[in-house]
Image (cartoon, rainbow, N blue to C red):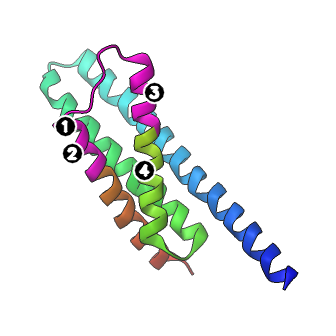
Amino acid sequence: MENVETVSKSSVKGNGIKILLGSGIAFVITLISLLVISIILTYTNISESILTVSVIVISALSIFIGSMISAVNINKNGIVNGSIVGAIYMITIYLLSSIFVSGFNLNMQAIIMIVISIIAGMIGGIIGVNFHK
């Protein structure tokens, strides 16, 4: 019986690391993409009005990819693990925002972003589980 508990604990720990890795990948993709968008906005005549939509799309795609990578490595419970990747991403973003942005509050745009992020994570997790060989 001890052996099963040891395997289960190490499996949970390993899955947690894979979920954090997926969240980290999502952040790296987001940072690179936002840098590209900022360079484009700086050196072209494209309106800054695309910024809000760009941030939402970039975040959703980043979470989707991070969840997919995480779920491929875990190979089970894709919808749960993907949603956890999305939740970790959004919790981190909103904790950092509340610390560094004065007047930070949750508004309808933030709620929409949270919902989209968790859904993107779920979809990425589902697809990632099905990519496993």
Question: Given the image, on which type of amino acid does mark 3 rest?
Answer: Leu
Dominant SS type (magenta):
helix
**x and y, in percent, of residue 34 in the image:** 36, 31
Q: Which residue is mark 4?
A: 87
Judged left or right of residue 118, residue 12 is right
Residue 114 part of the magenta-drawn span? yes
Per the rendered image, the range of residues in magenta is 92-115
Question: Given the image, on which type of amino acid does mark 4 rest?
Answer: Ala
- Label 1: few (<14), some or many (≥20) within 10 Å? few
Q: Which mark is residue 112?
A: 2
> Dot 4: what SS?
helix
Q: Which residue is mark 1?
A: 109
Cα distance between the residues tagged 2 and 3: 18 Å
**x and y, in percent, of residue 68 in the image:** 46, 63
Q: Which mark is residue 49?
A: none
Extreme right residue here?
2
Above or below, 78 against 63 in this view is: below
Judged left or right of residue 61, residue 8 is right
Residue at position x 20%, y 33% from top?
A: 107
Q: Tags 1 and 2 in contact by the CB under 8 Å rule?
A: yes
Cα distance between the residues tagged 2 and 4: 13 Å
> Dot 1: what SS?
helix
Cα distance between the residues tagged 1 and 4: 16 Å
The foreground one among 26 and 88 is 88
| Label 1 or label 4, whichever comes before in sequence order | 4
